[in-house]
Image: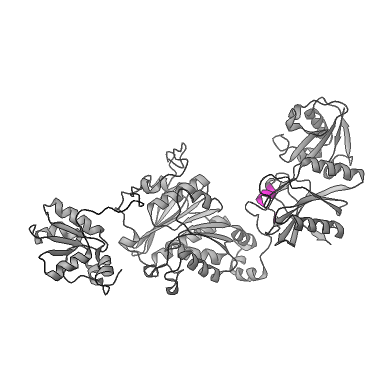
Amino acid sequence: MIRIQTQAWDTMVSHAEKTFPKEGCGVMLGSDGVVLEAVPLPNTYTGPQEDFFVMDPKDLNRVDREARERGLDVLGVFHSHPNCDAYFSKRDLANSCSWFSYVVLSIKNGRFDHANSYRPDFDQKEAPKEELIYG
Amino acid sequence: MAKILIPTPLRQYAGKQDAVQLAGQTVGEVLQSLTSQYSDLRRHLYNDEGKLRSFVNVYVNDEDIRYLSKEATPLKDSDTVSIVPSIAGGSAGIAAPPVTLSKEEILRYSRHLIMPEVGMEGQLKLKSAKVALIGTGGLGAPLGMYLAAAGIGRIGLVDFDVVDFTNLQRQVIHGTKDVGRKKLDSAADTMLDINPYVEIDRHETALTSENALQILKDYDIVVDGTDNFPTRYLVNDACVLLGKPNVYGSIFRFEGQATVFAYPGGPCYRCLYPEPPPPGLVPSCAEGGVLGILPGTIGLIQATETVKLILGIGEPLVGRLLLYDALAMRFRELKLRRNPECPVCGDHPTIRELIDYEQFCGIPNQTHEPVAVEGDIDPVEVKAKIDRGDPFVLIDVREPHEYQICKIPYAKLIPLGDLPKRVNELDSADEIVAHCKSGMRSAKAMDFLKQAGFRKVRNMKGGILAWSDKVDPSVPKY
């Protein structure tokens, strides 16, 4: 289960709406399974960003270091699916990392529609859905 | 000694420490030492083959070891090693099963959902599936309607034809009101009326070597509902090259065939028929006719196989050619094997891209202007000869049952097949004009008579269809 506090949730939704129709992404920080803060990161994919995102590992490294100095953990990552549902796509699975919760936000016509959270396995074969509580 | 920073989600496996000091000359040695000390970490960083997992990046200070010496990168005491995952993804690609069915969809698919072989999981597979349907004619009609009804999420239709009256005897996806409309629009309307929850892509084009891979690459399964050899070979080769199953069906008169080609390990169309038949040997449905219900039977066998492939249930029709005889009402099966020598799906394929299929099937390039064939005579001129009372013999080389549909009163019926034994009824001194339905068979009759020593033989261009258009519209077309 992952719980996202209102302020962090608002940051995620507004970032995903702002990057529409491209995919937006970022990191979720917190502790004990509760997300207290969301950090939007640039989508560094050099191809069409309407259906793909890549985070720069350097950004991730930096956010992780800064978070640990403030006593926060990286609990997961989020990204948006513009104009389609918040499923975990084959591409999501093929690029997934088993350490994190993956929150996917469906943005339709520029507005937030729904969201789901997934926990991918080690071998990038499955990503079971986990309970997501936000707001 | 080097310092390794442990990413937050992995700290629970490293004694809750955020950093560990470890001895080692290289990155590989230090990671080895880390995972032997904290064995639970190993599976998070390495796969079963002992390689770093694809999503694991290792940095020495600010440099990715991929751009240094990889795991052999040397370390100094002051270095900091960080383990950073790659994070990427996106909505593209085939969706994993969509999250849910709506309440309305659950009600609609109730009879599927209550069967454990389909169930919610299977219905979601159907909803995630993308099927390309080549042709919305005889086979395409039942296919389109039932695949839409079954809840296939996305169906791509490929057709460029327009509905005409001769289609309605079998192409039940189109109605009388649709005559003159694009088949794509007419078919899509019917399918969306049956099931508004499916998405339909309209590809208004003939499938060609230039566009086939581009069109078909986005679908999981290709269903061949075409009626000519060039397209059949094209669909087959494209499916083999793209690695997508080709659900095949064909019909002629009272008989049909169905199977699944290009399934992993199974045969392809070329394993069965390495070469096309000579042009003109196998008549099309337009020439030979077809029982209107037949494409219903064969199309639904194709639809059944398509749904089974998506659900992954039952025994697919792979390596078996199903033969159906409507008059005997019998099904038979022929075993098919993949041919290791097959030029497209064999062990050493020689065809690695799409070729010119019209040429392969011996069909002359149709972009050239038709040349006037020596010995052709226009129906209008034939009519003038009759009216003037010119002495000549008009022979109709069609079959008696066609003669019953319509005829030119002046003509004498000698079916093409009977011509050799009835040639003595004709006098080589007479001027002779032959006609049939559209001009093909009468051309053959003309050739035969010329070889038999007749000099004054001509072929009525366009047959009785052209007669109806140009001379007497009261003659029905068929």
Residue B343 position in % (x across, y down): 42, 40
Residue B59 is covered by the magenta coloring: no
Residue A127 position in % (x across, y down): 72, 51
Residue B204 position in % (x across, y down): 48, 59
Can residue B180 be seen at all in this image of the molecule?
yes
Tell me which corner region of the image, top left, top right, bottom left or bottom right, holds residue B52: top right
| Number of marks in the rendered image | 0
**Depicted A51 relative to depicted B181: above or below:** above
> In the drawing, does residue B315 fall left or right of residue A99?
left
* Residue span colored magenta: A87-93
Give me the residue at 71% from left, 39% from top: B54
Residue A88 is covered by the magenta coloring: yes
Residue B93 position in % (x across, y down): 63, 51
- Can you say which quadrant of the picture contains the N terminus of chain A? bottom right
Q: Residue furthest right?
A: A70
> In the drawing, does residue B457 fall left or right of residue B307?
left
Can residue B262 be seen at all in this image of the molecule?
no
Give me the residue at 53% from left, 46% from top: B243
